[in-house]
Image: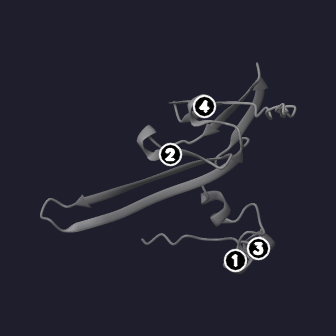
Amino acid sequence: MMLIPRRNYGLNLFDEFFNDPFFTGTSEKSEDSRKLPVMRTDITERDGNYLLEIELPGFKKEDIKAELKDGYLTISAETSASNENTDGHGTVIRKERYTSSCKRTFFVGEHTRQEDIRAGFENGVLKLQVPKDTPKAEEAPKYIEIQ
């Protein structure tokens, strides 16, 4: 006896219609939108600092980069994996490759220095402590006495 997968098109006709690749990105239920890696971020303010907690499940510390340039903090993560099963005789039965990357940028202020940012990664969560950008007070002009 052969089992054939059965789909009931009558019950969710419109769901199937909008999951068509033509409508990709317009439906929250679309398969592509569920696969996109997103850096879910919580930002809190405490003691003159911004605390960022960024979820990066499936990534290792070595996969993550943080770059500060012109007041913008860019967090990027990239990973890849490969699975290969053989039947013992060298014949490949299944071969899968997986890559994932994501990137997000935050404006942290032009006066923020790299040395002032603290970062830690544990249990799939990147925690950053960024000082609030405080603009430097303009100095009053100092006049030179002419003799």
Label 3 amino acid? Phe
Q: Which residue is mark 2?
A: 65
Q: Which residue is mark 4?
A: 117
In the displayed structure, 33 sits above or below 113; it is: below
Task: Say whether marks 3 and 4 touch (CB < 8 Å).
Answer: no
Task: Say whether marks 1 and 3 touch (CB < 8 Å).
Answer: yes
Other residues around mark 2 within 10 Å, as few (<14) / some (14–19) / many (≥20): few
Label 4 amino acid? Ile
Q: Which residue is mark 1?
A: 20
User: Residue 127 appears at what percent x and percent y?
Assistant: 60, 31
Snapshot quadrant of residue 50: top right
In the displayed structure, 95 sits above or below 79; it is: below
The disc, 2 or 1, on the residue closer to the chain's N-terminal end is 1
- Left or right for 77, reference 39: left
Snapshot quadrant of residue 37: bottom right
* Residue pictured at 48% horizontal, 44% vertical: 59
